[in-house]
């Protein structure tokens, strides 16, 4: 059984996509053992409660340093024997010790086709606003491994989504979620659970 820790900062729609895939039998041998939120009061915590998954709020602002925050996150994940960390709309940068302890075992979903519209400050609806502002015809989502910089780890999966002339950023955000994020994040978890992801430097090979 692959023990998964999911990290969230908001509504938890990607968390729900993972849960739906587990409950439907599409992710055999996978279990979410804990959900960690970066802040109180987000709906993702309610989703965890409804599914009887232990949850915690570990907020960077409650710690004097990134190192102390890093240690708290690491201790929590280790206490649940987490094997794969999934950032499902998690907005805080992880520290070096945490990332190194879970080398090639932390994956993130980002709402653009990296390297477009990514990096520090590109989160939530902002990548969709920039896609419309730049007039791109295609956007999408990317699942990648996490390192110590924003959106810079090896890419696992990408899925393209058309940008339509009448799109607002909100409409585009919803379409990217439905047509890309909620599909490729569970797919990447499945590949990982089956041992089908091989990392060679910055390149990922799907076996």
Image (cartoon, helix red, strand yellow):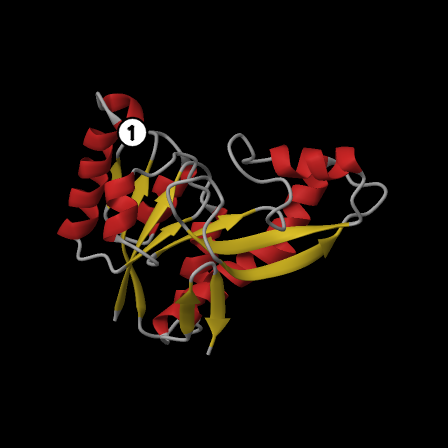
Please tell me which residue is depicted at 80% across the width and 49% down the height of the picture. 137
Please tell me which residue is depicted at 60% across the width and 50% down the height of the picture. 177
Please name the residue that numbered disc 1 is placed on: 59
Q: In the rendered view, would you say 177 is above or below 56?
A: below
Please tell me which residue is depicted at 81% across the width and 39% down the height of the picture. 135
Count the numbered circles shown.
Answer: 1
Q: In the rendered view, would you say 153 is above or below 46?
A: below
Whether residue 23 is visible: no
Q: Nearer the viewer, residue 116 or 84?
A: 116
Side of 164 where 191 appears, left or right: left
Q: Quadrant of residue 93?
A: top left
Label 1's element? loop
In percent of width and height, residue 161 lies at 71, 55
Please tell me which residue is depicted at 53% across the width and 37% down the height of the picture. 119
Q: Quadrant of residue 195?
A: bottom left
Q: In the rendered view, would you say 25 is above or below 81?
A: below
In percent of width and height, residue 75 lies at 15, 44
The residue lying furthest to the right in this view is 165
Few, some or many C-alpha atoms within 10 Å of disc 1 (few <14, some 14-19, many ≥20)?
A: some
The residue lying furthest to the front in this view is 201
Q: Quadrant of residue 27?
A: bottom left
Task: State which quarter of the image contains the N terminus.
Answer: bottom left
Q: Nearer the viewer, residue 172 or 45?
A: 172
Side of 71 where 166 appears, left or right: right
In percent of width and height, residue 98 lies at 25, 44
Side of 81 where 43 appears, left or right: right
Side of 134 where 141 appears, left or right: left
């Amino acid at each position: 059984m692959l023990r998964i820790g999911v990290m969230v900062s908001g509504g938890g729609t990607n968390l729900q996509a993972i849960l739906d895939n587990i409950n439907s039998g599409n992710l055999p041998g996978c279990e979410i053992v804990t959900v960690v939120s970066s802040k109180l009061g987000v709906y993702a915590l309610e989703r965890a409660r409804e599914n009887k998954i232990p949850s915690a709020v570990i907020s960077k602002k409650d710690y004097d340093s990134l190192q102390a925050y890093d240690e708290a996150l690491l201790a929590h994940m280790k206490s649940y024997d987490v094997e794969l960390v999934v950032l499902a709309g998690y907005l805080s940068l992880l520290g070096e010790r945490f990332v190194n302890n879970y080398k090639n075992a932390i994956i993130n979903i980002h709402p653009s086709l990296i390297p477009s519209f990514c990096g520090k400050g590109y989160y939530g609806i902002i990548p969709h606003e920039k896609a419309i502002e730049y007039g791109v015809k295609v956007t999408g989502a990317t699942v990648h491994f996490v390192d110590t910089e924003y959106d810079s780890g090896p890419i696992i999966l990408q899925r393209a989504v058309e940008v339509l002339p009448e799109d607002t950023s909100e409409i585009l955000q919803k379409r990217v979620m439905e047509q890309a994020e909620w599909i490729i994040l569970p797919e990447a978890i499945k590949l990982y659970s089956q041992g089908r992801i091989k990392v060679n430097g910055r390149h990922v090979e799907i076996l």
